[in-house]
Amino acid sequence: MRKREIIKNVSSSWFSLGVNILVGIFLSPFILHRLGNTAYGAWVLAFSVTGYYGLFDLGIRSSIIRYVSTYTATNDMEGLCKLINTSLAGYTVIGAAAMMVSLAVSTYIGSLFRMPADFLPTARLLFLMVGTSVALGFPAGVFGGILEGLNRFYFVNATNLISTLLRAVLIVLALTHGYGLLMVAFVTVVLPLLSSLVRAVIALRLLPIRFGWKYLDRRSLREIASYSSVSFILMITYKLRFKTDEVIISTFLSVAAVAFFSNADRLVDYTAEVVSSLAQIFIPMSGQSDATGDMDRLRKIFVAGNRACALIVFPITATLIILGKSIITAWVGARYVTACYPVMLVLLLPSTFALAQAASPRILYGMARHKSLAWVTGMEGIVNIILSVILIRPFGIIGDALGTAIPLTCTTLYFMPRHLCRVLKVRVGTFLIEAYALPIMLCVPLLVALLLMRRWFFAHNYWQVGLQIIISLVPYGLGIAWAIWTGRVWKVDGLSVRKESDEVDAALIETYQQEP
C-alpha cells in the first residue's frame, strides 16, 4: 500500500509538473513578445515581490504538514482538530496583514522601483491584484497542507493541473483578443483560489475535522510556534537565496533587465520543481517514521531518497549544459542566448549540488530537527545579498547570479551531507557511495549521446531540440529500466552506522533535544 501511495504521489506530481513546464515553455515567450520587455519585467517583478508575502506564513504550513502526519499516525483526532482550527485562525490574521502591505506597496511603487511614468497606474493595479490574491491564499492554503500531511499529494496535483491548463487557455484567449497585462494577472490569480476551494472540500471529506472557538488552543499554538519559528527562518533564507535577484536587478539595473535574468532562472526553477515534486513526499514519510521511532527507515529514506533525486537532476543538468544554447534559442529566441546561457550555467551547477540532496532538508523537517539548517542557510542568504549587490555593478546580471551561486555551493557541499550523516549516524563516505554511484554511472552514456547530438547539428526549434533530447535519453532510459528491474534504485546495501563515543552521543542528544 505504501509503495502504491508513493507511485501515485510521485507520478501525479511529475505529470502535473510536466504539464506546468510545457505550459510555461510555450506561454512565457508568448506573453513576453505580446507584452514587451517592460510589461513582462513588471509581471515577473510583481510575483517576485509578492512572493515575499510568503514570509507571513511564519512556517505554519510546514507545521501543518508535519503534525497532520504525526497526529494521524497516532490517531490523535482531538489534537488534529486543535491544530487545524488554531492554524486557520492564525492564517486569517496573517492574510489581513498581507492585505495592508499590498495596499502600501501599490501606493508607493513609483518610488520603490525604476519604471516609466506612464506605466505606473497599470503597475499599481497589478501589484494590488496579485497581493490581494496572496492574502486570500493564506487561510485557503490550510487545506492543501492537510492533504500533503495525509500524503495525498495527488489531490493537490490534480487541482493544480486543471488550474494550469485553464490558466494557459484563458491567457492565450485574452492576449489574442487584445487584452493586456491586467487581464493576464486576473486570470493568473483567480484560478489558484478556486483550486484551494476544491482542495478544502476534498480535505474535509477525508478527515472529520470539527470547527469552533473551543478548538482554539494555546498548547497547539505553542506547538505550532515552536516548530514553525525555525521553518520561518528557513523561509526567509529561501527568499534571500533565490527571490532577491529580480529586486536587486530592477533596483541597480532596470526592469527590462529582469526579463533576461528571468529566462535563465526559469530553466533552473523548472529543474528544481521536477526534483521537489519527488522530494516533497519525504516530509510526511519522515514525520511518521520519527513519530514511531523507526531510525532504520529514516536512514533508508535518507540514502535512497537522495539517490532518487540525483537520478532526476543529473540528466537534466547534463542536458541543459550541453544543449542549453539550443534550448534557449528554441524557447525565447537567439538574441537571448548571449545573456541567458552564462547566467543559467552559474545558477545551475550549485543548484544541482543542492537538488541532489533534496531529500535531506525534508527529512530534517519531518524529524523537527531543522534548527541548524535554518541558521546555516540564514548566513548563506545574507552573504548572497551582499555578494550580489557587490558583483552586479561590475558584472551585470552574471554578477548577481554569482552572488547566489558562491554561498550556495559552500552550503551544499560542506554542511548538508555532514550534518545529515551526523544526525542519522551514517558514515559520510558510505552515504556518498550509496546515494550517488549509481546516478553517476548511468549518466556516462547520456553525456556521450548529448555530445554526439550537439556535434551532429545545432537545434533551432522545439522539434529539433526534442529529437536530440529523446535520442540522448535512450541509453539513460535503458539504464534506469535496468536499475528498476534489478531493484537497485531503492536498494540500500552495507549502510554502516557511524560509531561515536558516549560523550559525543550525549552531546548530540542534548543538542537536538533543544531543537523544536
Image: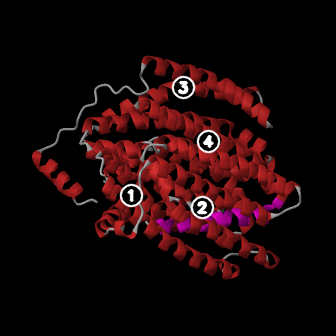
Cα–Cα gap, marks 3 and 2: 32 Å
Nearest to viewer (mark 1 / mark 2): 1
Please say if 165 is above or below 4. Answer: below
Q: Which residue is mark 1?
A: 63
Q: Which of disc 2 and disc 3 is earlier in sequence?
A: 2
Q: Specify start and end residues of the magenta stretch as a single range.
A: 35-57
Nearest to viewer (mark 4 / mark 2): 4
Q: Which of disc 1 and disc 3 is earlier in sequence?
A: 1
Nearest to viewer (mark 3 / mark 1): 1
Q: Which of disc 3 and disc 4 is earlier in sequence?
A: 4
- Say if the magenta span includes residue 69: no
Of the residues shown, which amino acid type is indicated by label 3?
Answer: Val
Please say if 312 is above or below 180. Answer: above
Of the residues shown, which amino acid type is indicated by label 1?
Answer: Ser
Q: Which residue is mark 3?
A: 444
Of the residues shown, which amino acid type is indicated by label 4?
Answer: Ser
Toward which corner of the image does residue 429 lie, by quadrant?
top left
Q: Is residue 297 left or right of residue 105?
A: left
Considering the numbered disc 4 on the image, is that residue within a helix, a strand or a loop? helix
Local packing at callout 3 (Cα closer than 10 Å; few below 14, some 14-19, many 20+) is: some
Q: Which residue is mark 2?
A: 400
Q: Which residue is mark 4?
A: 16
**Do the residues bearing badges 4 and 1 touch, measured as CB atoms within 8 Å?**
no
Of the residues shown, which amino acid type is indicated by label 2?
Answer: Asp
Local packing at callout 4 (Cα closer than 10 Å; few below 14, some 14-19, many 20+) is: many
Cα–Cα gap, marks 3 and 1: 41 Å
Considering the numbered disc 3 on the image, is that residue within a helix, a strand or a loop? helix
Q: Which of disc 2 and disc 1 is earlier in sequence?
A: 1
Percent of width and height locating residue 130: 66, 67
Q: Predominant secondary structure in magenta?
A: helix
